[in-house]
Image (tube, rainbow, N blue to C red):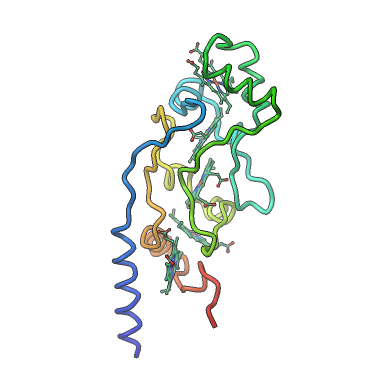
Amino acid sequence: MRWLCIALVALIVALFSFAAEPAEPVKQPIAFSHQHHVGTLKLECKTCHVNPSPGEMMTFPAEAKCMACHKTIKTDSPEIQRLAKFVEEKKRVPWVRVYQVPSFVFWSHKSHLDAGASCAECHGEVGTMPQIVKAKGTTMGDCMSCHSKYKAPNDCSFCHEKVN
Ligand code: HEC
Ligand code: HEC
Ligand code: HEC
Ligand code: HEC
Ligand code: HEC
C-alpha cells in the first residue's frame, strides 16, 4: 500500500510539472511598467502592494497612489489620461491577473513572507520587466518542489481541504 501511495504522489507531481504556462505578457488596461517604477524610480513593492490582514492577498494599488504623482507627471500621455478617467469615474482599474491559484487551493502571502521567501523567488525580478510576465510556475509540482527545498510540509491536506 505504501509504495502505491508514493508512486501515486510521484505521478501526480510529474503530471503537474508539465502544465507550465508560456511566459507571454497579458494586455493590461493601462501600460504600467515595473521596469520603470521599480527599476528606474526605485519604488518599493510595499508602496503599491500592501498585505492587509489576514494576509492572503498583496492587492493592487489604490489609484490615488498613482495620482499622487500622475496628477502632474505625464498628464499629456493617453495612458495617464485613461488612468485619470478611471479615477474621475470612481472605478478601479480592471488589472488582469497574471498569477492565480484555483480557489480549492489554500494560499497565503503572509505565511510565505513570514517563512522568509522573497517576492523574486516566486515572481522573478519584476524591476527588469516592462510588462509583468509569469516568470515562475504555480502548478502543484512547482509548489511542492519548493516545499521540499524548504522542508515545509507536502501532505495533501496542507494545501487542500480534506476530502473525507
Ligand atoms: C508604482 C506601483 C507599483 C510598485 C512600486 C510595484 N508594483 Fe507590482 N503591480 C503594480 C500594478 C499597477 C500592477 C498591475 C499591472 C501589471 O500587472 O503590471 C502590478 C502587478 C504586479 C504583479 C502581478 C500580479 C498578478 O498576479 O496579476 C506582481 C507579481 C507584482 N506586481 C510584483 C511586484 C513586486 C515584487 C514589486 C517590488 C519589487 C512591485 N510589484 C512593485 C504596481 C506596482
Ligand atoms: C513616485 C511617483 C510615481 C508613482 C507613485 C507612479 N508613477 Fe507612473 N510614472 C512616474 C514617472 C516619473 C514616469 C515617467 C514619466 C516620463 O517618462 O517622463 C511614470 C510613467 C508612467 C507611465 C508611462 C506614461 C507614458 O505614456 O509614457 C504609466 C502608464 C504610469 N506611469 C502609470 C502609473 C500607474 C498606473 C501608477 C500606480 C499604480 C503609477 N504610474 C504610479 C512616476 C510615478
Ligand atoms: C511563495 C511564493 C510567493 C511569494 C514569496 C510572493 N508571492 Fe505574490 N503571488 C504568489 C501566488 C501563488 C499568487 C496568486 C495567489 C492567488 O491566486 O490568490 C500571487 C499573487 C500576487 C499578486 C496579485 C494580487 C494578489 O493580491 O494576490 C501580487 C500583486 C503579488 N503576488 C505580489 C507579491 C509581492 C510584492 C511579493 C513580495 C512582498 C510577493 N508577491 C511574494 C506567490 C508568491
Ligand atoms: C519559495 C518556496 C515556496 C513556494 C514557491 C511555495 N511555498 Fe508554500 N510554503 C513555503 C514555506 C517555507 C512555508 C512555511 C512552512 C511552515 O510554516 O512550516 C509554506 C507554507 C505554505 C502553506 C501554509 C500556510 C499557513 O498559513 O499555514 C500553504 C497552504 C502553502 N505554503 C501553499 C503553497 C502553494 C499552494 C504554493 C504554490 C502556488 C506554494 N505554497 C509555493 C515555501 C514555498
Ligand atoms: C504545496 C501545495 C500542494 C500540495 C501539498 C498538494 N497540492 Fe494538489 N494542487 C496544488 C495546486 C497549486 C493545484 C492547482 C494547480 C494548477 O492550477 O495548475 C493543485 C491541484 C490539484 C488537483 C487538480 C484538481 C483539478 O480539478 O484540477 C488534484 C486532484 C490535487 N491537487 C490533488 C492533490 C493530492 C492528492 C495531494 C497529496 C499527494 C496534493 N494535491 C498536494 C497544490 C498542492
Left or right, 27 with respect to 19, comes to: right
**Residue at (61%, 31%) from the top-left corner?**
47
Q: Quadrant of the N terminus?
A: bottom left
**Residue at (40%, 41%) from the top-left corner?**
124
Left or right, 21 with respect to 51, comes to: left
On screen, residue 2 above or below 155: below
Q: Residue furthest top?
A: 76
**Residue at (67%, 31%) from the top-left corner?**
91
**Residue at (32%, 53%) from the top-left corner?**
20
Residue 97, x across and y down, in percent: 50, 43
Q: Residue furthest front?
A: 89
On screen, residue 32 above or below 136: above
Residue 28, x across and y down, in percent: 48, 32
Left or right, 111 with respect to 98, comes to: right
Near-viewer residue (160 or 89): 89
On screen, residue 17 above or below 76: below
Q: Quadrant of the C terminus?
A: bottom right
Which picture quadrant has residue 6?
A: bottom left
Near-viewer residue (83 or 157): 83
**Figure disc tally:** 0
Residue 56, x across and y down, in percent: 60, 53
Residue 98, x across and y down, in percent: 46, 43
Which picture quadrant has residue 162?
A: bottom right
Left or right, 118 with respect to 136, comes to: right
Near-viewer residue (119 or 134): 134
